[in-house]
Image: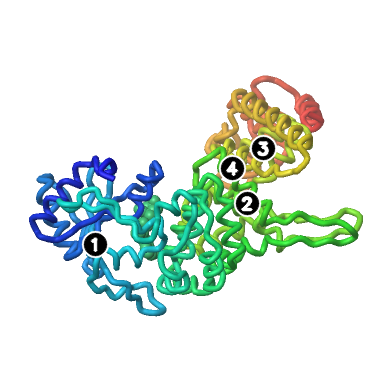
Amino acid sequence: MKKSLTNPIFKIISAVAEEQKVTAFVVGGFVRDFLLNRVSDDPDIDIVVVGNGIEIARKVVKAIKKNIKLSIFKNFGTAMFQYEDFEIEFVGARKESYRRNSRKPIVENGTIEDDQKRRDFTINAMAISLNKDSYGEFIDPFNGKKDLKKKVIRTPLEPDKTFSDDPLRMLRAIRFATQLNFTIVPETLDSITKNSERIKIVSKERILTELNKIILADKPSKGFKLLEQTGLLSYIFPDLEKLKGVETIDGKQHKDNFYHTIKVLDNISKKTENLWLRWAAILHDIAKPQTKKFIPGQGWTFHAHDFIGSRMVPRIFRELKLPLNDKMKYVQKLVLLHLRPISVAQEGVTDSAIRRLLFDAGDDIEDLMTLSEADITSKNEQKIRSYLENFQKVRQKLKEIEEKDAVKNFQPPVSGEEIMKAFNIMPSKEIGIIKNAIKEAILEGIIGNSFEEAYEFMLIKGREIGLKTSEKPKIVRQKSEIQNRKAKGKKE
Ligand code: ATP
Ligand code: MG
């Protein structure tokens, strides 16, 4: 295993350990990812010292002879520093010993094997020696390497013990199974199901970290199926759990919205790494249970689930400890608009529908199109193909219209001041009325998005609502002509 120790930091640690007469090992994720030939998203190197981990970390930092900041967490007996691309974390070997109902360990010094035992899974419990006379030796008391080959997740000890010592590990099992596309062995999986309720004692922040890692996997549905199957989902994300199930009335069945949602999530994950766009996929149909109705002769409807769903987003974000900032606003907006591209594609791609879509989605139009496309989960190949073709048309038209009319980041072409000046009025509700009428006229295609046309339209509209001005429309175009265009615009 010497091949894994190319980073010069290992030699430095080895020399310091030798000099201090302690033993040190690299363990956990680094060893696993080396054997898998995998590049981790957050590369860190965990070093276990049989002795005082913090002390050794201090000496290692000194030996590197660079200005490195060491962060020490006395309570946990750990110390950490950044070295090139890696976070290197030092910890003293511990004997398992957890207080019930608390994740905070009471730490007792132990051997390397004691320490390996208290790790979550066999594939995370492998170590490599950094000691002079056994440098590079592989230490694998729980056959982690064999489990890697078999692609399985298994606890090193009896699973009930591992999970009751720290219930977060249940979620980690599912996270690793999803990230690595591994199978959780039946004994371990059964134990998760049995102990699922214990997840309640874990902090929401830690749960969210694992949940986000599941969401960012190549095929997140695998994780969500496991969460559902083990019962964990109902504790950590009840709103999503509620999407499960089908109902039949008059021989008409609606689809299972849980499976639909995680399929949409898989679809979108092929197109984007953006966590928030993936969250929008998870939440796009979240209000379907609340809005579900059977209308005889029509079938199942979920009226306004887009609108109600977007209003549920802040509560869900708060409960899951997701950030209540512009990311939340973005998810809300996508949930609100998720049906729009589909209805545009279905009801005919008119210029005005496209302009309204651009106006409402703004810079998020591309992401909205991606979400809407991912939302097509029909089993009928023919149907999917025809949808996707329509989407192509919508995309083409979006491009054309935006080049022509620039409504994506709409700025009123005539300002409030200009309106006040033209009609010699003070700030009043008329200004809002005129501004809105101009915007509507542009979106409907009655006038183009330019100052001249908008100004002219303003003069006419102002007179219409009883305002007075000495100015005449510059380009003398009659009101009747504008009405003609209005009628035409409607027909488009
Ligand atoms: P990654 O960093 O890619 O998410 P990792 O395996 O490195 O995966 P970390 O959370 O960085 O995961 O933890 C490092 C190591 O610490 C793990 O490999 C495992 O041995 C151990 N570990 C982490 N959390 C726990 C836990 N809750 N219970 C037991 N062992 C744990
Ligand atoms: Mg790690």
- The residue wearing badge 3 is 356
Residue 441 is drawn in which quadrant?
Answer: top right
Q: CA distance from mark 2 to mark 1?
A: 38 Å
- Crowding at label 3, few (<14), some or many (≥20) Cα neighbours within 10 Å? some
Picture residue at 67% right of the left edge, 59% below the top: 287
1 vs 4, front mark:
1
- The residue wearing badge 4 is 268
- Crowding at label 2, few (<14), some or many (≥20) Cα neighbours within 10 Å? many
Q: Amino acid at mark 2?
A: Ile
Q: Which mark is residue 262?
A: 2
Q: Secondary structure at mark 1?
A: strand
Q: Residue furthest bottom?
A: 100
Q: Secondary structure at mark 4?
A: helix
Q: CA distance from mark 1 to mark 3?
A: 58 Å
Q: Is residue 166 visible?
A: yes
Picture residue at 29% right of the left edge, 65% below the top: 113
- The residue wearing badge 1 is 91
Quadrant showing the N terminus: top left
Q: Amino acid at mark 4?
A: Ile
Q: Secondary structure at mark 2?
A: helix
**Which of marks 4 and 3 precedes in the sequence?**
4
1 vs 3, front mark:
1
- Crowding at label 4, few (<14), some or many (≥20) Cα neighbours within 10 Å? many
Residue 82 placement (x, y as % from top left): 23, 48
3 vs 4, front mark:
4
2 vs 1, front mark:
1
**Relative depth, front residue between 398 and 405:** 398
Residue 429 placement (x, y as % from top left): 62, 48
Residue 166's place in the image compared with 275, above or below, is below
Q: Are marks 3 and 4 in contact (CB under 8 Å)?
A: no
Residue 334 placement (x, y as % from top left): 60, 47
